[in-house]
Image (tube, rainbow, N blue to C red):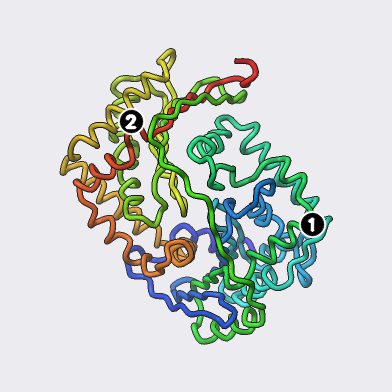
Amino acid sequence: MRKWKIILATFLIAGVSSAQEVDYEEYDLDNGLHVILHQDNTAPVVITSIMYHVGGKDRTEGLTGFAHLFEHLLFDGSENIATGTWDEIVSSHGGQLNANTSQDRTYYYELFPSNNLELGLWMESERLLHPIISQEALDREIEVVKEERRLRYDNRPYGQLLPVLGETLFSNHPYKDPNIGYMPDLESATLQDVVAYNEKYYVPNNAVLIVAGDLDISKTKKLVADYFGPIPKGAEITRNNPKEAPITQEIRKKAYDPNIQIPAAMVAYRTPGFTERDARILDMISTYLSDGRSSKLYKKLVDDQKQALQIGAFNIGQEDYGMYLIFGLPVGETPLQTLVTEIEEEVEALRMGLISEKDYQKLQNKFENDFVNSNSTIAGIAGSLATNYMLYGDTSLINREIEIFRSITREEIRDVAIKYLKPTQRAVIEYLPGDKMDN
């Protein structure tokens, strides 16, 4: 068994060869489940994964955090999988598993030696067809999620940073609430609420199944039909999330964190959803500003002027709206406003002119390398296929996305900075040590 785990870990890291085009086949079952198959017989491993189009933003007021709760709850067991044995079944067959939830989707997967393909399909079909959602399981998993919230958010240094960012940039859209939810909402969740949530979102017509690796296409199609074909289709899901009014004047805010000693400066902007071309340009801008020691903000504030311990620019992609954050930790007594001023100087330079040809070529090389690496493992390919279909509406991006980045011009980089990264459209947040009541 140890041998298989070593093999699986090796192919998670080094799996398939690098830059070749990813071949795949996709189709729909009668119940609406979208299926994508990718055959690569170079290693005896296979991944079975499902992405559901449900995330933190899919909630009602007072019932936040349900998608993340389900990430835990749907590992609890099923009518045919005893409570608490999901991990044991996977590991005893030489496999690995995981799941993760964002504001927009939830993703589950199992990676197995390829002779356990049928087991992986059966387990994912059990999650859809026969989940056991009992009061006992709900109580147990709510406590697990509450403890996770304490560790990752409430008691972790800078753990409130993203929740503060969301509540600052959004007044109406569900992105204002943290993906993990609020403690009172978790504590008040009823079994009836949770069962209704499962029946609404965890249905085949709200999911995509990916099977990738060492498989036979025709045999896999039959297994998929056998295990997933009988699952009933769910009701059509409609979303009508509130729109946000544009930010037209700078927002100033203070937030407090009792778990930190060094304050932070946060400069944030609301940006377009990640399917927009402009969102990819913002990815390039964040790389230009802070990716690596030679990037503009790092070299200026950390190396040359020694005003920051740490600096980073992040384009946080989401389906409806994105969040663009520039985050800095000051050195010594450097005022937070000094970091804000220096950050704006570099952003203004982007708005006022074109980046150099040398910097532009560095960006192109970096994104080319990232694209190759993203498709260099079976696990990476499966995740890309699921994301491109479910969230971008175009599976072929797995082979074409680099063409979009190659086509981005220096002029577009300038124009997007002008469009979204203006002082009148930003939020400046002082993230300070201590408790708000003490200040």
Q: Position of residue 403 (x, y in %)?
A: 27, 61
- Which residue is painted at 39% across and 45% down in the image? 271
Q: Which residue is mark 2?
A: 298
In the picture, the quarter occupied by the C terminus is top right
- Residue 166 appears left or right of 120: left
The image position of residue 408, as x and y in percent, is: 24, 53
Residue 325 position within the rendered picture, expressed as x and y whole percent measured from the top left: 42, 37
432 is higher (above) or lower (below) than 7: above
Q: Is residue 46 at least partly visible in the picture?
A: no
Asked if residue 335 can be seen in this view, the reply is: yes
Q: Quadrant of the N terminus?
A: bottom right
Task: Between residue 74 and residue 2, name the one nearer to us.
Answer: 74
Taking the view exactly as shown, the residue that stands out farthest to the left is 357
- The secondary structure type at the circle numbered 1 is helix
SS at badge 2: helix
What distance separates the C-alpha of mark 1 from that of mark 2?
49 Å
- Report the residue marked by disc 1: 191
Q: Residue at x 79, y 62 (%)?
A: 83
Q: Earlier in the sequence, mark 1 or mark 2?
A: 1
In the current view of this chain or complex, which residue is farthest to the right? 136
The residue under label 1 is which amino acid type?
Leu
Nearest to the eye among marks 1 and 2: give it. 1
Q: Quadrant of residue 358?
A: top left
